[in-house]
Image (cartoon, grey):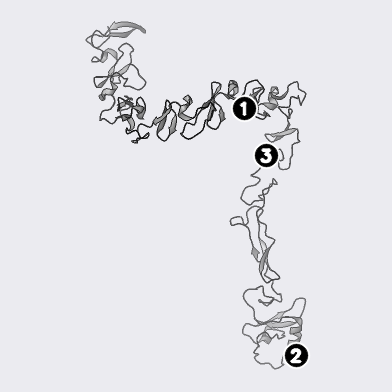
Amino acid sequence: MKTFVSWRHVLAGLLLVGAAACKVEFPENAPYTCATDADCGGESFVCAALPNGGPRYCCKPEPVELCNRLDDDCDGEVDELDDAPCYTGPEGTRGVGACKDGVSVCASDLSTVCVGDVKPSVERCNQVDDDCDGQVDEDFDLQSDNFNCGACGVKCTAQQNCVEGHCQKRSELDCGNGIDDNLDGQTDCADRDDCDNQSCGAGCVCKNGRKTESDCGDGLDSDGDGNTDCADRDDCDNQSCGAGCLCVVGRKTETVCTLGTGDEDGDGKANCDDTDCAQKECGAGLTCHGAQCLEGSCANGVDDDGNGSTDCQDTNCAGLSCGNGCTCQGLAKTESNCTDGVDNDGDGNADCADSDCNFKYCVDGDVDSACYQGRCVENNCRDLVDNDRDGLVDCADSVDCPRGTTCTRLVNGNRVAGTCQTNKTCG
């Protein structure tokens, strides 16, 4: 590009122009006046004009206008960037909601800056996507927001609540001040329309028209009924009385029994020493047996209590589960579920085929079935039910209900007692 730097440069250049019509060679940075492009000698030079009818001069355009105080594109303007669009906000927000482009301009230090672009701002309730996330007013619940009730900008008064998008008067403003605030004849928790499930003070909540204890471990009679914490059974039974503590039948009980933890219920005994921890977990694979923390996981293949015996071989596992359908008995695994078709104790025999199941019911939910001599048998020949699920009912199941066994038959819809006959009927 060849152009002028100032008016003074242009005027000085006018003195250098010759009248001869010949090809002109331009020195670098020397301005020349002209009337048409032809006066500039070709080679892509054009005759450019200063703004407002100013002098014309020869200029060789560059493809892009730069911030360098020069007329790079030979349009008579210096450092104009043709309002090129720009955006400096976070990726993904350009053109979303209120976010829009600005224009690129040259700064005084010759850097390019973006002016006028709108970036994300805090979402306001104004029916505009201010934070440019594709949602409008998403941070406001118009159904319950006291400052934007039903619509943006609709404010409820201090005596109102926003309920389902409408400002409604809240009569009882304080449910624990002992005052009938709305003069309706009902004070505090007794004013159920206003105070049910509202606070009636520290550790107190209104429920069903009365004060109830809501903090059962603060040592205070928060509802003023004369009973404190767990002693307030109506409110605190089965509620937490603090970390590792539960109110049970009017008293604090220990719920965390792991060795090394504290006396959470404050009775002077911690962990397995506290009877509250009986048969509760006291560590990985361990259970409180009396005052000791012993084997409690009897199916993990680990000697959890380190006494040299593992799982059912440990006397501490007697009567405890050794897995689904399995119970430790006599230092061995025994089948305890005889209805699931699974060899639960891993001895190669399932259900009635396992001697552990003798005399135990063999059909889930039917106590009139029983394992006997390795098979599932009918144990009730009088109930008109196929108890062992072999497809034969009562006397028809002649192996289990032989001739002479007491049975029941139907006569005109009535049950009549009889005995099983050789023809497998009840007669």
Question: Looking at the image, which is closer to me, 197 or 56?
Answer: 197
Quadrant of image for the N terminus? bottom right
Asked whether the viewer can see residue 386, the reply is no
Residue assigned mark 1:
219
Relative image position of residue 392 (x, y in whole percent): 28, 17
**Is 206 in front, or is 279?**
279
Residue kind at label 3, given as amino acid type: Leu
Foreground mark, 1 or 3, reads 1
Q: Earlier in the sequence, mark 2 or mark 3?
A: 2
Q: Is residue 285 above or below residue 188?
A: below
Q: Which picture quadrant has residue 338? A: top left
Instruction: Name the residue rendered at 55%, 32% in the picture.
Output: 243
**What amino acid type should be assigned to the residue bearing mark 1?**
Gly
Instruction: Confirm or deny contact between disc 1 and disc 3 (CB under 8 A).
Output: no
Query: On the rendered image, what quadrant is the C terminus found in?
Result: top left
Amino acid type, label 2: Leu
State the residue position of label 3.
142
- Which residue is disc 2 drawn over? 15
| Residue name at image x 60 percent, y 25 percent | 229
